Image (cartoon, coloured by chain):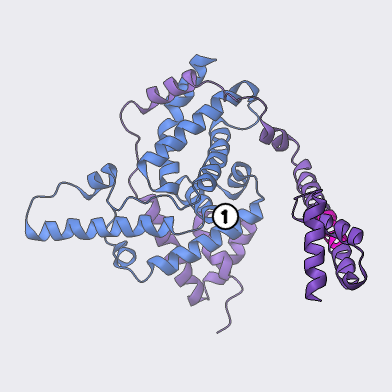
Amino acid sequence: MTGDFNRIVYKHGSKIYNTVYSMLGNREESEEVVQEVFCEAYKSYASFKGDSSVTTWLYRIMMNVVSDHIKRKKRPPLIEDGLSIEEHEAVGNLPDTSESAENAFLKKQRLLHIRNALLKLPIPYRSVFVFSAIEGYNSVEIGKIMGISAGTVRIRLFRAVKMLRAMLAPTAAFKEEDNEKV
Amino acid sequence: MKKCRFHRTAHLYPFNMLSEREEKTFEVHLASCGECVRIVDEARRVKTLYRARPQHKPSMGFEQKILRTVTMKPDKQTDGLDWMSFFRFNSALFPVAVCLTIILFVSFLFIRAGEIHRKSEVISASTTNQQNMTPSDYYIKWNLRGYERDLLSDDKNAAMESYYKMRGKM
C-alpha cells in the first residue's frame, strides 16, 4: 500500500499544489493544505475502490480540506503581495535596459492583477473557474469533484467569468493579451 | 437595455460547457449578435489569461516531506471523552441538546422568580399589618427579614428591642 501511495504522491503532488495555490494564492498555506490533503488521502486509501479516477478522488479530498481550512481560519487567505518564483521566471531575466525594465515591471503588475482578481472571487466560484479554465475539466467532472450538479457548475462558472470580465476588462492586462502572452 | 437571451450561454461557450446541440444553436445565433460576439471574445480572453499563467511548483523535497508527515502522523489523541465527536457522529442530537439546555435554563429562572415572589409577598403582608403586630409577630417577621438577608437569628432580645423602638416611632 505504501509503495502505491508513494507513487500517487509523486505523480499528483505538484498538480494538487498548483490547483491549491491558484485557489489560495499563498505558498505556505498551500503547502500546509496539500500535506493535509495527502494525510486524509492516506487515511482513506484503503477504502478507495477506484470508482473514480485517482485525480478526481484527490481533488474531492482537496475541496473538503480547502473549505475546512478557510472555515477554520475565519479570514481570507493571506495573499502574497509579490510574485511567486515561477511568475518571476515567467517575467524573465531581461537585460537591464530602461525599456526592458519598464516592460518587466508592467508584466509583473499584470500577473499580480490577474492573480488578485481570481482571489477576489468567492471560493465556490473560484474553485469552479480553476477546475474549468486552468485544469480543463468539464461540468460533469467538476460536479463529481465538488459534489454538485452540472447545472450548478455552469451557473457558478457563468458568475465567475462575469465577475472576472468586469474586473479585468478595464485593465491593460486584458487589452495586451492579444499581442503578448505571459 | 434588454439582455440577449443567450447572455449566459455566451459566457460558457469558450469553456466547453455546452452540449453539442446548445453549441450549434448558439453558433447560429452568434453570427447575428454583436453583443454575444463581444462577450465570447472577452470570456475567451479571461480563459487564455489564466491558462497562460505559469505552473506553480512546491518547494524542493516537498513530496518527501509529505510522505514523512503521512507515515509519521499519529491519530488524534483525546484526553478522556471527546464530547464533540459524539455530536459530530450524531449531528441530529446537537439541536436537541441545545433545546434541552434552553428549557432547563428557562425553568430554573421561573422557579427562582417564583421563590422571590413568594418571599416578597410574605414581607409586604407583614409590613402592612405592622401596626397591629404583637411582639411575637414582630419576632417572627424580624426573623423572616433575617432569613431574607440569609442571617437567621434567634436573638429574641434584639428583636424585642427593635420592636419597642419601632412602636416608639409610631
- Give the quarter of the figure containing the N terminus of chain B: bottom right
Q: Give the percent coordinates (x, y) of residue A43.
A: 58, 24
Furthest toward the left, the residue is A97
Q: Is residue B15 visible?
A: yes
Residue B86 percent across, percent down from the top left: 72, 33
Q: Which amino acid does label 1 sit on?
A: Met
Q: Residue at x 52, y 76 (%)?
A: B33
Residue A112 locus on image (x, y percent): 31, 56
**Residue B76 in the figure: left or right of residue B45:** right
Classify residue B89 by image quadrant. Answer: top right
Question: In the rendered image, which residue does mark 1 sit on?
Answer: B17
Q: Which colour represents chain B?
A: purple
The stretch in magenta equals B111-119
Of B60 and B165, nearer the camera is B165
By secondary structure, the bulk of the magenta-drawn segment is best described as helix
Query: Looking at the image, how many numbered discs can be counted on the residues?
Result: 1
